[in-house]
Structure formats: structure tokens, C-alpha cells
Amino acid sequence: MKVYPRPEPGDQPSLLYPPYASTVRRAPARPPVVLPHTLSELTGPVFGHGPIGGADDDLTRQHAGGPIGERIIVAGRVLDEDGRPVPHTLIELWQANAAGRYAHAVDDHPAPLDPNFTGAGRTLTDENGNYRFVTIKPGAYPWRNHANAWRPAHIHFSLFGPCFITRLVTQMYFPNDPLMAFDPVSQSIPDERARQRLVSRFDLELTVPEWALGYRFDFVLRGREATPFEGRP
Ligand SMILES: [Fe+2]
């Protein structure tokens, strides 16, 4: 039986990272119990096949008018750890508006809502694992983690992949953002190279002249390990 490898040490955020205050309350207090992967984890279904279409992948066309902000294209590929494309997989996205405000009941940050921007989208990868969103660049926003805490501009993503344990929830950042160095969410990833994998790349080729700037961002989901576990899977 083939299995999915466990993450490399340092690659993933620390479950307990006291500078990121809410991890103190939610990090497990006891060592994790290793559960062998079974058919429940290795097979779907992982999401409903509700129709995706309309302006789901274009957050600038979901309302009567266009949103305020810098229009951007975010595109790339979804791959597994062996570099193989993950086709027809669901990608969901949510983000703040250009002023750094979420259209959400608990966001009381005193920045304006945009009636033409909800900040949620979704799409499926094509047969080669490619995806593409049109949206606006989100603003930085304050949060109450510590004194004068600001999140760098970021877009939240959720991907399902081919089975339950390939589910990935992550955040994408923008190049050269000075707030990243002060951000305990991104700094909770110990390995600097892993942190940099969360930073999108400005891509002039992706940019549409006189219309939108382009940022490229690839996702890598857990891949099938060629070598089976010894003993009990
Ligand atoms: Fe956020």
C-alpha cells in the first residue's frame, strides 16, 4: 500500500508558537497520536460537485460595479510532491478588500467596506493543474495579536486535492512586503525557505497590459511516496 509522506521538519508552522497568541490556546498539550492512513483518508469524496461558473474565479465581476483597488491576476499550478499536476481540483480563495477590511460580521476594523467586493472565489484546476483568478490586491490590516500588529497583504486559499489528507489551507503573500518580518503567522514556519514558498512572484508575462498586474503562485500538495512503509501501513 502506498502512503503519503509526513512533512519535512521545519516545513510547516509550529503548532505552538507563542508570538502567535492564539496558538497558545489551541495547540495540543499532549504529543500527537500517529494514525495509520486508511481508505477513509486515501479516498474521496472530498467536496461536493456543485456547479462552478459565472464570476466565481473573477472577484472583480461579482457585483454591479468593479471593486476599488489594484486589479491583479493570480495564477499558477497545483502539483503533487513528485511534480505531477493535480487536475480538476477545487481551489477556494478569500481575502480582505483593498482597504484591508473583510466583508465579515466579526471584522470591525475601521476601514471601508466595498459594496462591489465580497472577497470570496473558487475555481477548478484544468487537466494540467493550471488555475487563474482575477481579483484586487488586498490591503494590510491590523489585528490584536500584540501591540501595533499588522498582517501583511495576503490571500487565503483552501485546496482539496485528490483525497482528504491532501487538503491544504494556506496563505499567499506578495513580494517584498516589509510587514512579513513582523508577522508571527508567517514567522511560525521555522524554515526560511519554506516561508519564502508562500510569497508569490511578480510575473510580467502574466500581466495584461493596461488592465491587471500578474502574480504567479504554485501549490504543492502531498504526493504519493514511492517507497511503501515497512511493516503495518
Ligand atoms: Fe486574513
Image (tube, rainbow, N blue to C red):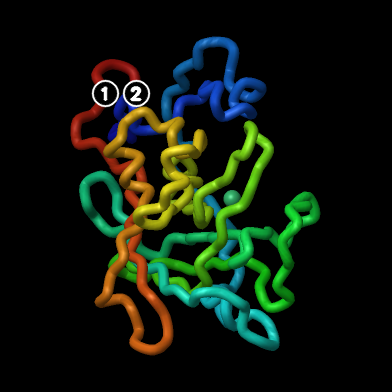
Image disc number at residue 233: 2
Q: Where is residue 180 in the image (x, y as percent from the top left)?
A: 44, 44
- Of 165 and 153, nearer the camera is 153
Q: What residue type is labelled 2?
A: Pro
- Of 162 and 158, nearer the camera is 158
Asked if marks 2 and 1 touch (Cβ < 8 Å), the reply is: yes
Q: Position of residue 221 (x, y in %)?
A: 36, 47
Most distant residue in the front direction = 148
Left or right of 76: which side holds 65?
Answer: right
Bin the neighbour count of mark 1 within 10 Å (Cα to Cα): few under 14, some 14-19, many 20 and up. few
Q: Identify whether 232 is placed above or below 128.
A: above
Q: Say if disc 2 is inside 8 Å of ligand 1.
A: no
- Hey, which quadrant is residue 10 in on the image? top left
Q: Position of residue 74 (x, y in %)?
A: 41, 68
Image disc number at residue 179: none
Q: What residue type is labelled 1?
A: Phe
Quadrant of the snapshot with the N terminus = top left
Mark 1 — residue?
Answer: 229
Counting labels gives 2
Image point 48% across, 38% down: which residue?
182
